[in-house]
Amino acid sequence: MALRGREELSGFVGGEGFEASGPGCAGTEVAGDVARDLKLCQNAEIEKRDPDTGDKTGEMSGPLKDFVPDGITNQVKPRIVKVLNEIKARAPQAKIYLVGYPPVLSGNGQCIPGIGTEEAPWLNDEVAPKLSQEMKAAATSVGATFVDPAPDFQGKAICGDPESINGIVLTGRSEADNDSPNPSMKSFHPKISGARLYANALERAL
């Protein structure tokens, strides 16, 4: 993902918001001084925020290749467990299903400017499986059922054919989606066809 200066990287893991600071990350061809200022996503760092309030902490994350897996395990997973336990407390007879995330890129994400061949495997083969692993562990720990939608999205994620997850969206915003010129909140979220794929996965588990 091409990040430079202080561009926003929202929803990177588990819905948390982060703000990039300093050198960004990119895998596309760039020239001159720009190339020297860019880093692969996994080697870049971001400004940390409190995962509950979104407030800046004044600290930097260090390389994302270390920060993201740790954040999934120690920040995202405990909060999922907390929510699932609250659901159980309010609906003790309910059967709870937790649907995971698929890898978001097909074809190494080469249709997305800024995604390189070294970054896409990190996102797809390391970050996505780690998130699924911890979500499954969270579900299991409270007696819920984890549903893995990854097989349904095979070849149909961003850059797939057909593409069922939005890439970078800049137009067609709703009234609340008004943070232009930053990308729309639709970016990296399912299209209607992607929502159908999620439903297919869930229906099989029911």
Image (spheres, rainbow, N blue to C red):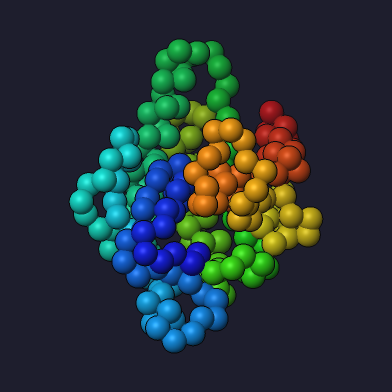
Residue farthest to the bottom?
32
Q: Residue at x 48, y 35 (%)?
A: 139
Horizontal and vertical percent position of residue 123: 51, 62
Residue farthest to the right?
162
Is residue 157 depicted above or below 179 in this figure?
Answer: below
* Closer to us: 115 or 130: 115
Residue 114 visible in the shown view: yes
> Looking at the figure, which quarter contains the C terminus?
top right
Horizontal and vertical percent position of residue 38: 41, 75
Q: State left or right for residue 56 relative to residue 69.
A: left
- The count of marks equals 0
Q: Residue at x 79, y 55 (%)?
A: 162
Q: State left or right for residue 56 relative to residue 154.
A: left
Q: Residue at x 42, y 15 (%)?
A: 89
Is residue 47 depicted above or below 65 in this figure?
Answer: above
Residue 118 visible in the shown view: no
Horizontal and vertical percent position of residue 133: 48, 49
* Closer to us: 206 or 106: 106
Q: State left or right for residue 138 relative to residue 47.
A: right
Instruction: Name the quadrant containing residue 100.
Output: top right
* Closer to us: 42 or 5: 5
* Closer to us: 95 or 12: 12
Q: Residue at x 20, y 51 (%)?
A: 58
Horizontal and vertical percent position of residue 59: 21, 54
